[in-house]
C-alpha cells in the first residue's frame, strides 16, 4: 500500500505540468472552434476584403471557404475533446502522447503556408503556435524534471 501511494503521488507531480498544458491548449482549441463555427462567414468575408483578393470571388468559392472554416472548427473541437480526455483520465503514457500531439499540431500549423493571410494575422498566428511548442517543451521536459 504505502509504497504504491508514494509512487502515485510522485507520478501526479510529474504529470501535473503536461496535464495543465494540454488543458490550456484544449481551451484555446475550443475557443477557436467556437469562433470558426459561429463566425465562419464573417471571417471569410474579412479575408476576402483583403486587397489581394478580387471583389468578384465566385459564390461557390466563397461557400467552399466558409465550409472549410466550419469544418476546421469541428476538427478543432474534436482535438480539444481528445486532449481534455488525455489530460483528465489518461495514464502517464497518454499524457505524454497527448502533450506531444499538441506540439505536433502546432508544428503542423507552422509548416502549412498561409499566403492568403495578412502579414499581421500571419505573424500573430505564428507567434501563438511557437508559444504552444515552447510551453509544451517546458511543461513536458523541463518542469517534470525539476519536480521533487
Image (spheres, helix red, strand yellow):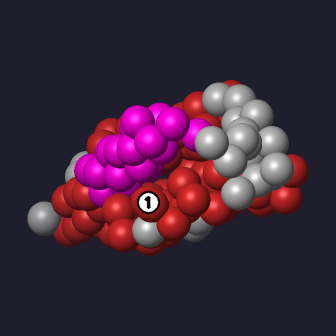
Q: Do we see residue 10 in this rendering?
A: no
The magenta-colored residue range is 57-80
Residue 115 as seen in the image, left or right of residue 15? right
Magenta span contains residue 75: yes
The residue under the point 65% across, 29% down is 112
Q: Position of residue 58 (x, y in %)?
A: 51, 36
Q: Position of residue 133 (x, y in %)?
A: 66, 47
Secondary element under disc 1, as helix, strand or loop, is helix
Q: Quadrant of residue 106?
A: top right
Q: Looking at the picture, does residue 101 appear above or below residue 18?
A: above
Magenta segment's dominant SS is helix
Location of the N terminus by quadrant is bottom left
Q: Looking at the picture, does residue 102 appear above or below residue 33?
A: above
The residue under the point 82% across, 50% down is 51
Residue 147 as seen in the image, left or right of residue 82? right
Q: Do we see residue 70 in this rendering?
A: yes
The one of 65 and 145 positioned closer to us in this rendering? 65
Q: Kindly identify which residue carries mark 1.
A: 40
Residue 59 as seen in the image, left or right of residue 146? left
The one of 83 and 74 positioned closer to us in this rendering? 74
Location of the C terminus by quadrant is bottom right
Q: Furthest residue to the right?
A: 119
Amino acid at each position: 500500500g504505502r509504497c504504491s501511494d508514494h509512487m502515485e503521488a510522485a507520478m501526479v507531480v510529474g504529470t501535473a505540468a503536461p496535464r495543465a498544458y494540454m488543458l490550456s491548449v484544449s481551451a484555446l482549441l475550443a475557443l477557436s472552434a467556437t469562433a470558426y463555427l459561429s463566425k465562419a462567414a464573417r471571417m471569410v468575408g474579412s479575408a476576402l476584403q483583403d486587397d489581394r483578393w478580387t471583389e468578384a470571388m465566385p459564390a461557390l468559392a466563397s461557400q467552399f471557404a466558409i465550409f472549410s472554416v466550419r469544418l476546421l472548427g469541428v476538427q478543432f473541437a474534436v482535438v480539444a475533446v481528445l486532449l481534455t480526455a488525455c489530460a483528465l483520465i489518461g495514464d502517464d503514457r497518454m499524457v505524454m502522447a497527448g502533450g506531444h500531439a499538441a506540439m505536433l499540431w502546432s508544428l503542423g500549423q507552422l509548416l502549412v503556408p498561409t499566403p492568403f493571410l495578412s502579414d499581421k494575422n500571419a505573424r500573430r498566428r505564428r507567434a501563438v503556435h511557437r508559444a504552444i511548442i515552447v510551453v509544451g517543451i517546458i511543461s513536458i521536459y523541463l518542469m517534470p524534471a525539476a519536480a521533487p
